[in-house]
Image (spheres, rainbow, N blue to C red):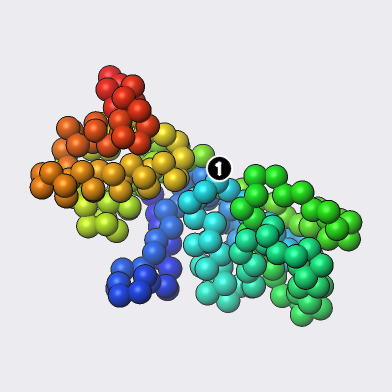
Amino acid sequence: MSQIALPLSHQGSSDPDRIVIGSANAAVIDALQKPDSWPYKTAILAGEERSGKSLLGKWFESSGMGDVIDGADAIDETELFHRWNRAQEDGRPLLLISDAEQWDIKLPDLRSRLGAALHLEITTPDDEMLASLIETIAIQRGLALGEGALTYLVPRAERSFAAIERLVETIDRLSLERKAPATQGIWRDALEAVQGPEQGRLL
């Protein structure tokens, strides 16, 4: 499983944000690297909470491939239409990131323009990507997962980016609170705390 290391770091940290590339986003990343092929050089990126949409937007913009409007669905539609027009005049690729489950565009001119754009979506991670996400988040937090963690956690974990982040955060918190290494008892209790007792005890 590969990653993209962003040239951006959290304040006070030398470790850059990393984007895990896997089943959920490989096609999106491939498309983002070919902005000249987008219809009207415009693409709309959607995906679930914490799926890395904003990180991909930062990577795209910092790579010099085009401009990004994050949270485009929350911007005044007339202003967004003007920004789309300016991008067309400048011949500059434009990536719009939407947080809406269903982006209902009211302005007819904007709706027709964006309807012709390339629509990209980050989907649900498979087991391999799930394991890489757990590992990456744990490394970023400085959390040492005990032997067998992925074998235990992956079949039991909810298939969502936000849930995986909460799970690793909870393992880290319980490990610190108990002053104990992150081994099976803590993995189980973290799963129960995040997803309920049935998942924590799943055989």
Q: Amino acid at mark 1?
A: Thr
Residue at (24, 33) in percent of width and height:
189
Q: Residue 112 appears in which quarter of the rendering? A: bottom right
Is 137 above or below relative to 66? above
Q: Position of residue 8 (x, y in %)?
A: 42, 73
Q: Residues within 10 Å of mark 1 (few under 14, many from 20)?
A: some
Q: The C terminus lies in which quarter of the figure?
A: top left
Q: Residue furthest top?
A: 203
Q: Nearer the viewer, residue 130 or 3?
A: 130
Q: Position of residue 118 (x, y in %)?
A: 72, 55
Left or right of 154 in this view: 41: right
Look at mark 1 in the image and give the residue it sits on: 123
In the displayed structure, 108 sits above or below 67; it is above
**Where, by quadrant of the figure, is residue 88 drawn?**
bottom right
Q: For the image shown, how many numbered marks are present on the structure?
A: 1
Looking at the image, residue 147 sits to the left or right of residue 164; the answer is left
Residue 28 seen by the camera: yes
Secondary structure under the numbered disc 1 in the rendered image = loop
| Residue 35 seen by the camera | no
Q: Residue at x 69, y 57 (%)?
A: 73
Q: Position of residue 197 (x, y in %)?
A: 31, 24
Nearer to the camera, 50 or 147: 50
**Residue pictured at 56% horizontal, 68% vertical:** 60
**Residue sticking out furthest to the bottom:** 90
At 27% from the left and 57% from the top, the residue drawn is: 141
Q: Is 172 left, or right, of 84 in this rendering? A: left
Q: Position of residue 7 (x, y in %)?
A: 42, 73
Q: Nearer the viewer, residue 13 or 28?
A: 13
